[in-house]
Amino acid sequence: MNNNNPILFVGAGPGDPDLITVAGQKALAAADLVIYAGSLVNPAILNWSRPGAELVDSASLDLAAITGRLIQAWEAGQQVVRLHTGDPSVYGAIHEQLIILRERGIPAQIIPGVTAALAAAASLGLEYTLPEITQTLIITRAAGRTPVPEGEDLAGLARSRSSLAIYLSAGQGPAVAAALAGAYGPESPLALLYRATWPEARVVWTTCADLAETLEREHLDRHTLILAGPAVAALRSGAITPKSKLYDPAFSHGYRQTQTPTGSHGT
């Protein structure tokens, strides 16, 4: 075994092949083996792979099979990429893979990617962190087959009245609706983004009260991000919100001193 190349865990981005990072693109172009999440990664992203590279869909593989292929290829001296959707650190299930590799003394490196919450905000023209409105973005999911820890229930997080990007929860419309309505109000708007940046991307607006019915009517039971909170509401209503002090001429900081009013000599 004489392979000094780490196994690369690469974030594929939200779907658009152009939204993979330069580092991720270079990793795919050099890889001998790419194991990708076929149910989530846009197949067009695999076009960045070099001709002749082995491409393996992990959708039907369990943890042992995936890590076994990674280890076998690495021990054979190959350059190996494990390609995840979005950013590997957000619902990527990479922790257990990395533990197995560390136990074998195999180096691994993560190349980040654009997660769906950021791509969704870009497509909407949304800023999650509006001055004096909310300065916090919470990425979370509703409890389902995978539970959430105590203290992270959706209703409790929503009570912070922060911006919420809710992943992996479109199949639980009634529960999500109840949790959000209690904090934001039943008429608070929600943005539903299906496959943000993919060719078939869709944006559907609804309210907390109508969420469950909208999800069912629009057949949105997966691959859908739910955005909630006062920043989303401000975008939908077109409300004028307080301006950031960052560009206020009367607000000085380390890179800009307070400007002297026009026509004044400072005396």
Image (cartoon, rainbow, N blue to C red):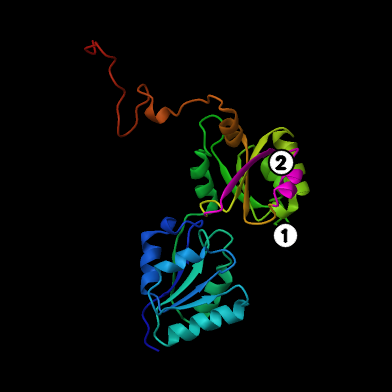
Q: Is residue 201 magenta?
A: yes
For disc 1, the neighbor class at 10 Å (few under 14, some 14 to 19, many from 20) is few
Q: Tell me which residue sits at (37%, 87%) in the image.
A: 2
Q: Is residue 78 magenta?
A: no
- Seen in the picture, residue 31 relative to 45 is either above or below; the reply is below
Image position, residue 159 (x, y; %): 69, 39
Q: What residue range appears in magenta?
A: 199-219
Circle 1 sits on which residue? 147
Quarter the C terminus occupies: top left
Q: Tell me which residue sits at (26%, 14%) in the image.
A: 262
Instruction: Tell me the tag on residue 180.
Output: 2
Circles 2 and 1: CB distance less than 8 Å?
Answer: no
Q: Tell me which residue sits at (57%, 63%) in the image.
A: 40
The answer to whether 249 appears left or right of 59 in the picture is left
From the viewer's side, name the closer residue of 198 and 64.
Answer: 198
Image position, residue 143 (x, y; %): 73, 55
- Residue 106 occupies quadrant: bottom left
Query: Does residue 142 appear anywhere in the picture?
Result: no
Q: Between disc 2 and disc 1, whose residue precedes?
A: 1
- Residue 145 occupies quadrant: bottom right
SS at mark 1? Answer: loop
Give amino acid for label 1: Pro
